[in-house]
Image (cartoon, grey):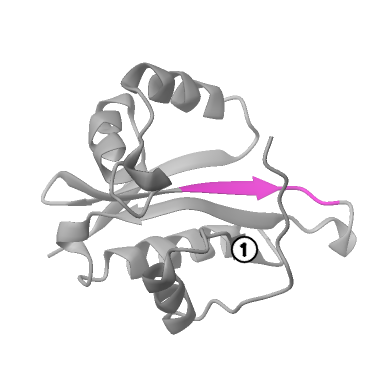
Amino acid sequence: MEILIREAEEKDLPSMIVLYSQPDMDNGDAISLEKAKEILKKTKHYPYYKVFVALMDNEVVGTFELLIMDNFAHRGAPSGIIEDVVVSEKYQGRGIGKEMMRFAVERCRDMGCYKVTLSSNLKRNKAHEFYERIGFKKHGYSFLVEI
């Protein structure tokens, strides 16, 4: 089956919310449709903040966000950040996540990024194994302050 990756549209939001409702994402607590619409509109105001969906047979089966930001360090080379990666449990193991990550890395390469990073919740062990299998490496430390 062919996997198509494109920028998310408002019509995709209900399917994306279902994906984010999976137990390993935000403890099954998903955003409202109204809030999702507001955020999708807001992303258009960032220089490069894109939300993508993966489709199989016109069905949204995965999604991720990609932010490309300029840097003062690294001689001004931009870097990419991948966030909120999720594939439908029903479709896992079919190459969708791998294709989404290939797409994101290639987009970063095309934009001149010197690196691409992603963050993943500590409890998503299956996802961590997947990322390592496709070439991502644990690197440095990540810190947070919950506010």
Residue 40, image x, y percentages: 45, 27
**Residue 79's image quarter?**
bottom right
Residue 130, image x, y percentages: 39, 75
- Residue plotted at (42% across, 45% down): 26
**Residue 11's image quarter?**
top left
Residue 37 position (above or below residue 49)? above
Crowd band around label 1 with a 10 angstrom C-alpha radius: few (<14), some (14–19), many (20+)? some
Q: Quadrant of the C terminus?
A: top right
Q: Horizontal placement of 72 versus 49: left or right?
A: right
Q: Horizontal placement of 82 versus 140: left or right?
A: left
- Residue plotted at (64% across, 49% down): 68
Q: Quadrant of the N terminus?
A: bottom left
Residue at label 1? 117
Marker count (numbered)? 1
Q: Is residue 40 magenta?
A: no
Viewer-proximal residue among 118 and 27: 27
Residue 57 position (above or below residue 18)? below
Q: What kind of residue is marked 1?
A: Thr
Residue 104, image x, y percentages: 48, 59
Q: Which type of secondary structure does the marked residue at label 1 adopt?
A: strand
The magenta segment is 65-71
- Residue plotted at (54% across, 55% down): 82
The secondary structure making up most of the magenta span is strand
Q: Horizontal placement of 135 versus 68: left or right?
A: left
- Residue plotted at (52% across, 64% down): 122
Residue 85, image x, y percentages: 42, 54
